[in-house]
């Protein structure tokens, strides 16, 4: 498989498959509008879909998708829009697409379509010669386990090589996720303690306070491990646990992420607690006897000199008490307790990376309680948005990268393979997940996953 940096030409046109679909409406079209409004995007956008709409209808659809718009900016986007209506299994669709893109230079084909259509579209493109001078961008999920991911990859590789494939993991487009890397490697403060000698455990929480809503059928076929752990949260773990890349080169970063994922042991069922919220089985599209998990808490172990013996604990779920994404690293306690912590023993130092809804870092330190001889925890915080200003949305960065060709914010296949390997033994476990009430932190035994329990999520910065 080619891991070289290869050719990454800037695209002359964007072909958007599934232009009338859900993902395009919710994410892609709004992001294209914002990029256009910011003066960062001005190129032909050819929507493809099986639809009765004509071009005017598509423009109207896009306007609704985008919401409150600035007329001039929307006019520019609408002026760039084209439409090729047709079935993805009909070669005629691709023949018409070829006419539409003739002379427009390098192409980006963005597949905002269900995964079952990825290969169909790739083949249709190849049949019309549109796989040459072109990149193919596919959305998640990439496979449903290691074997199906490999099979899908083989099918795509028939028509596009690795250098011309981009697998979207929109978490990689989030500024706060990328900021973890900058925070780790632009500062010298963390690196000396960022290892097994000083860190007792790392806890990653991705909580959502809403249930599966209208996504019952999709969710029931996937579950939490497939939906967010295999991709988003293992990517996060890789960024947090990897060694410093030797350069800022995309390949150097991807290689280091791959190296650390290689060292993560396959997760065992005994290191996992799965839950299902009460009422899930009544959701439209969910099988009445479904054993799909809507919550998971697990421990991962990394066999490396840096991390051996340090549990990396991940929990995520739907219908939890809050919507938050936070990483907490717990430092080892001082070897001798010189100061008491009031009524309770003094807590450990914590390093918190808040990623969502707001972004920043908090160090939980201990200070002397005035007038007493014991300690009290004091948070030392930086709120990134306050200090640094607003951030770009993930999809804007993903689309900008798809167009420019920079591969670093996409999932290279060898990383995808490793993450499927890591979760392989805990996919589709036969046992019924433990029930939990909506608005709770999952089933009771989940509390025992990290040594000493989960640290409370910090509330937002004030
Ligand atoms: C998606 C999952 O990939 O990520 C959803 O399918 C989840 O279930 C979503 O809600 C979370 O993304 P974000 O960007 O809203 O935090």
Image (tube, rainbow, N blue to C red):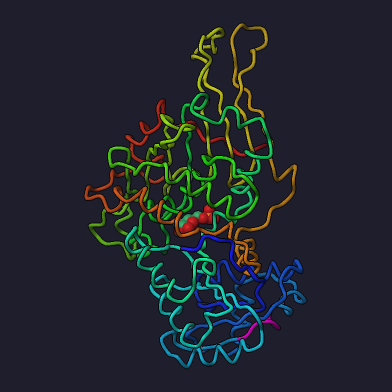
Residue positioned 60% across, 53% down in the render: 174
Q: Quadrant of the C terminus?
A: top right
**Observer able to see residue 208:** no
Above or below, 458 against 372 in this view is below
Above or below, 417 against 372 in this view is below
Measured from the top left, where is residue 235 in percent x and y?
49, 49
**Observer able to see residue 185:** yes
Above or below, 397 against 16 in this view is above
Measured from the top left, where is residue 424 in percent x and y?
32, 51
The answer to which of 192 and 51 lies nearer the viewer is 192
Is 81 inside the magenta-drawn segment? yes
Q: What span is in magenta?
A: 78-82
Residue positioned 54% across, 92% down in the render: 96
Measured from the top left, where is residue 343 in percent x and y?
50, 12
Is 287 inside the magenta-drawn segment? no
The answer to which of 154 and 136 lies nearer the viewer is 154
Residue positioned 59% across, 61% down in the render: 5
Q: Is the magenta region chiefly helix, strand or loop?
A: helix
Measured from the top left, where is residue 114 in percent x and y?
42, 72
Q: Quadrant of residue 57?
A: bottom right
The answer to which of 93 and 347 lies nearer the viewer is 93
Residue positioned 58% across, 31% down in the render: 351
């Amino acid at each position: 498989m080619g891991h070289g940096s290869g050719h990454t030409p800037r695209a002359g046109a964007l072909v958007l498959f599934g232009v009338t679909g859900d993902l395009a409406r919710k994410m892609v079209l709004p992001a294209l509008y914002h990029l256009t409004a910011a003066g960062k995007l001005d190129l032909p956008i050819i929507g493809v879909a099986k639809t009765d709409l004509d071009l005017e209808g598509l423009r109207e659809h896009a306007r609704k998708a985008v919401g409150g718009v600035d007329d001039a900016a929307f006019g520019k986007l609408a002026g760039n829009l084209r439409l090729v209506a047709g079935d993805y299994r009909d070669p005629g669709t691709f023949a018409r697409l070829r006419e539409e893109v003739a002379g427009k230079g390098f192409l980006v084909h963005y597949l905002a379509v269900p995964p079952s259509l990825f290969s169909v579209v790739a083949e249709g493109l190849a049949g019309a010669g549109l796989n040459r001078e072109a990149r193919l961008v596919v959305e998640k999920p990439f496979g449903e386990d290691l074997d199906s991911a490999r099979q899908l990859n083989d099918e795509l590789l028939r028509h596009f090589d690795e250098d011309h494939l981009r697998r979207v993991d929109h978490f990689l487009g989030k500024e706060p996720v990328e900021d973890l890397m900058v925070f780790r490697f632009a500062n010298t403060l963390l690196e000396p303690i960022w290892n097994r000698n000083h860190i007792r455990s790392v806890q990653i929480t991705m909580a959502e306070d809403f249930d599966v809503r209208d996504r019952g059928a999709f969710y029931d076929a996937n579950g939490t491990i497939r939906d967010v752990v295999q991709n988003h949260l293992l990517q996060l773990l890789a960024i947090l646990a990897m060694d410093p890349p030797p350069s800022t080169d995309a390949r150097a970063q991807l290689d280091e992420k791959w190296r650390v994922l290689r060292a993560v042991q396959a997760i065992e069922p005994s290191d996992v607690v799965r839950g299902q919220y009460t009422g899930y089985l009544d959701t439209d599209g969910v099988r009445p006897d479904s054993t799909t998990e809507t919550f998971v808490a697990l421990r991962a172990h990394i066999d490396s000199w840096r991390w051996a013996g340090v549990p990396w604990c991940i929990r995520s779920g739907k219908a939890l008490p809050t919507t938050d994404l936070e990483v907490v690293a717990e430092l080892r306690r001082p070897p001798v307790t010189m100061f008491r912590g009031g009524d309770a023993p003094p807590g450990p130092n914590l390093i918190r990376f808040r990623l969502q809804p707001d972004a920043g870092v908090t160090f939980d330190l201990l200070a002397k309680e005035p007038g007493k001889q014991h300690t009290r925890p004091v948070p030392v915080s930086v709120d990134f948005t306050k200090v640094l200003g607003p951030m770009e949305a993930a999809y804007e960065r993903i689309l900008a990268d798809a167009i420019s060709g920079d591969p670093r914010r996409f999932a290279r296949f060898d990383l995808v393979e490793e993450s499927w390997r890591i979760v392989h033994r805990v996919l589709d476990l036969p046992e019924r997940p433990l029930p939990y009430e909506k608005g709770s932190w999952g089933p009771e035994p989940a509390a025992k996953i990290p040594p000493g329990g989960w640290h409370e999520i910090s509330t937002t910065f004030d």
